[in-house]
Image: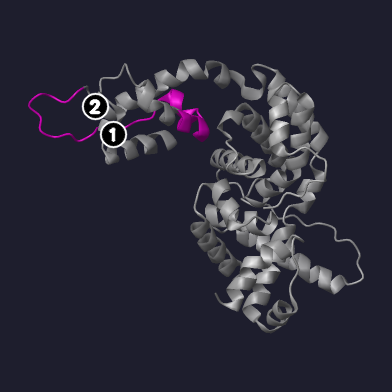
């Protein structure tokens, strides 16, 4: 995955180093840089919307407290996803029985192409609903690829699998999701 | 590599604006129902959770994270304060439950090594899965007081049952 970073902005590794040297602002910058993507991933992976904020917060706390175990093979963001994925699993076990993905009606903005917008929205809802029926690894690989734009090698690092296995999981997920929008 | 596979491999980059379709790829996409369907799935997947991310109070989260990190106990709560005291005890107790058959060590004349059903300690039941994983990680190094020579002596079946008992 290519993390677009404005020229001149410090890298994640530099911010981690600054935090470890006592710079609180570095931690704040890292949270602001990655919280949105992490929140989207956790939601897509099945976290209820009202739990996303707490899961994001806890993921960062665990990450900062365990920085010694981040060796830089994966990007900082991938490493966050791995921690977040484990936390979401724990949360799901505690909340077993709750709906995995909550589908909510939302007010659609008026557009110049209301029919096209409605079809896209319907496709999105079907995909979200279909995600909830997928095995966890298929769901998370699909999210890291489609939602986060990661390449298979980085997905493998984030989820502790191989690039080949990630590719297989992705294609199984896409096959199932394509059936839902056919 | 087929044209469909090539397209599939590039979809994430194009969907996230890092690349663009070539004219040849556009033509294929327009004529291949399979690739068109995958592209629709990819585009829909790229949008999942956008509203959640937009409503996330990032500044507030950052403030709370830094505050928690500055606090020694912070959001870790009782478990973090007790962790390094409780983990070796929990690990030892878990190993003991696996190693010793119900009622204590096997009788000298016994020939069976069948394990007693492993029950979960109440203390372990309250732990989260990630904490239980930490217990397991500590087993090889911190199981000294337990009467086994090494964790590696457990059979695969015993290790599986231990893990299952801890995960519930």
Instruction: For mark 1, give the secondary structure.
Output: loop
In the rendered structure, are the residues bearing label 1 and label 2 in contact, judged by CB atoms less than 8 Å apart?
A: yes
Residue A58, relative to residue A132: is it above or below? above
Q: Residue furthest bottom?
A: B31
Q: Position of residue B107 (x, y in %)?
A: 12, 24
Q: Position of residue A66 (x, y in %)?
A: 59, 29
The quadrant in which residue A12 appears is top right
* Residue at (75% x, 79% y) in the render: B23
Chain bearing tag 1 is B
User: Is residue B168 at least partly visible in the picture?
Assistant: no
Question: Mark 1 highlights which residue?
Answer: B117
- The structure's colour scheme is one colour
Q: Seen in the image, is B50 located left or right of residue A61?
A: right
Q: Counting other residues with Cα less than 10 Å from the Cα at mark 1, is it few (<14), some (14-19), or many (20 or more)?
A: few
Q: Seen in the image, is A46 located left or right of residue A6?
A: left
Looking at the image, which is closer to me, A21 or A157?
A: A21
The quadrant in which residue B17 appears is bottom right
* Residue at (42% x, 26% y) in the render: B138
Q: Position of residue B127 (x, y in %)?
A: 50, 28
Q: Which mark is residue A9?
A: none
Magenta region includes residue B109? yes
Image quadrant occupied by the C terminus of chain B: top left
* Residue at (51% x, 63% y) in the render: A168
Q: Which residues are magenta?
A: B105-134
Q: Looking at the image, how many numbered discs can be counted on the residues?
A: 2
The disc, 1 or 2, on the residue closer to the chain's N-terminal end is 2
Residue A167, relative to residue B165: is it above or below? below
Image quadrant occupied by the N terminus of chain B: bottom right
Cα distance between the residues tagged 1 and 2: 8 Å
Question: Mark 2 highlights which residue?
Answer: B102
Chain bearing tag 2 is B
């Amino acid at each position: 995955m290519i993390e677009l970073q404005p020229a001149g902005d410090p890298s994640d590794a530099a911010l981690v180093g600054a935090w470890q040297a006592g710079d609180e602002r570095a931690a704040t910058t890292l949270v602001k840089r990655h919280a949105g993507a992490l929140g989207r991933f956790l939601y897509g992976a099945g976290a209820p919307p009202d739990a996303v904020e707490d899961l994001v917060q806890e993921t960062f706390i665990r990450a900062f407290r365990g920085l010694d175990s981040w060796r830089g093979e994966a990007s900082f963001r991938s490493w966050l996803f791995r921690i977040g994925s484990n936390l979401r699993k724990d949360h799901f076990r505690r909340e077993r029985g709750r709906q995995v993905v909550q589908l909510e009606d939302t007010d659609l903005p008026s557009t110049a192409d209301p029919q096209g917008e409605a079809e896209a929205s319907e496709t999105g809802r079907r995909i979200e609903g279909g995600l909830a029926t997928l095995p966890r690894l298929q769901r998370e690989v699909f999210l890291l690829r489609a939602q986060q734009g990661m390449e298979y090698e980085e997905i493998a690092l984030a989820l502790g699998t191989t690039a080949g296995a990630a590719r297989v999981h992705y294609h199984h997920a896409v096959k199932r999701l394509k059936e839902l929008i056919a | 590599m087929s044209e469909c596979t090539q397209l599939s491999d590039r979809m994430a980059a194009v969907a996230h604006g890092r690349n663009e379709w070539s004219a040849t790829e556009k033509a294929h996409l327009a004529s291949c129902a399979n690739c068109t369907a995958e592209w629709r799935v990819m585009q829909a997947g790229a949008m999942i959770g956008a509203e959640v991310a937009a409503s996330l109070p990032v500044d507030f989260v950052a403030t709370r994270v830094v505050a928690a990190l500055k606090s020694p106990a912070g959001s870790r709560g009782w478990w973090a304060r007790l962790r390094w005291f409780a983990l070796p005890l929990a690990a030892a107790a878990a190993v003991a439950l696996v190693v010793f058959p119900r009622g204590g060590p096997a009788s000298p004349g016994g020939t069976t090594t069948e394990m007693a059903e492993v029950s979960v300690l109440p203390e372990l039941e309250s732990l989260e899965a990630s904490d239980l994983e930490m217990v397991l990680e500590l087993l090889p190094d911190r199981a000294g007081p337990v009467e086994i020579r090494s964790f590696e002596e457990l059979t695969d079946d015993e290790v599986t049952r231990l893990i299952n008992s801890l995960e519930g």
